[in-house]
Image (tube, rainbow, N blue to C red):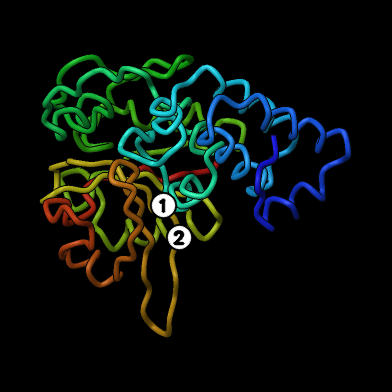
Amino acid sequence: MAVALSDEVRTALGRWPARGRALFDELIEDAASDLQREFLQRAVAAGHTPAEVHAFADELRPFSDDEAFEACTVDASLPRGTSLAQQLKAEADPLFAFSLKQAAPKSPPPSPAVDERLLLRRRFAFDAESAGPRVVAPAAKASAPAAGAEGTGTGVFRDLLDEATRAFGLSWKEHEVDGPGGLPMAQVIDGLALAVGRGVPVPAAVGPAAGAHRRLIIVLQVSTAGRTRAWQLYDPLSSELVWANEGDLLAGRELPFANKTNRRLTRVALPTAR
């Protein structure tokens, strides 16, 4: 079957071996519809190999046009967390869109309405009021800290970090920030600078006030400009990456996260050499 090919497709086919070009002719001949032939051409133009296009054609062949269109175009069924760059690529590359959708859960369970703060408390056991099951590292059982040593934390967060970084010769200690039995923010800043200056990200908690731990974040790095410093903070739940002025951290002023409840650092886990 003679099919008009765009210059882009012809150029891409020119990079294929003769055997691959013959295979493409067969795939076009065997395609179930003009829509499928269009998808195959776009997959070639996107730079896929003959083997990838062959497998794609075999997957598409049993589909109706409606099914093929749904499987190979960008819509709300893309996996959660798909980046903008991936969406743009999927717009032009039906094979890539198809692979993204195949990787998505077919029947995602409904998300129950939960209190995010309660969920974080249960998962990371930041404070003594945490409810529900607690996470314990496989090789270490969380033990209650000595009175006044680490605020009201259970130490589970610390034990998980100890296990994860044991090979690097690091151990971790949790500290309340500006809270009873904890460290003042000025001293915490010194510990943060020492850690991130050596390339070690620091887990921390944020919340509306000292002792109110609402969300886990990670302190990634510090940037110095003249006499001022700014700290890069990452929220893995919202995927926010922000810079906070050191003066705001020290004063407990509002952090630049979208959720303004999380206005200040409330707890940190600082690394030390074993």
The residue closer to the viewer here, 203 or 192, is 203
Mark 1, other Cα within 10 Å: few <14 / some 14–19 / many ≥20: few
Q: Which mark is residue 15?
A: none
Labels 1, 2: front one: 1
Q: Is residue 139 above or below residue 241?
A: above
The residue closer to the viewer here, 151 or 209, is 209
Looking at the image, can residue 47 be seen?
Answer: yes
> Residue at coordinates 65% horizontally, 24% vertically from top-left?
30
Mark 2, other Cα within 10 Å: few <14 / some 14–19 / many ≥20: many
Q: Secondary structure at mark 2?
A: strand
Q: Which mark is residue 84?
A: 1
Q: Secondary structure at mark 1?
A: helix
Residue with the most extreme bottom position: 226
What is the number of callouts on the image? 2
Amino acid carrying label 1: it is Leu
Looking at the image, can residue 274 be seen?
Answer: no
Mark 1 or mark 2: name the one nearer the start of the chain. Answer: 1
Question: In the rendered image, which quarter contains the N terminus?
Answer: top right
Would you name the residue on which mark 2 appears? 221
Image x and y of residue 265, in percent:
23, 53
Q: CA distance from mark 1 to mark 2?
A: 25 Å
Image x and y of residue 55, in percent:
66, 24
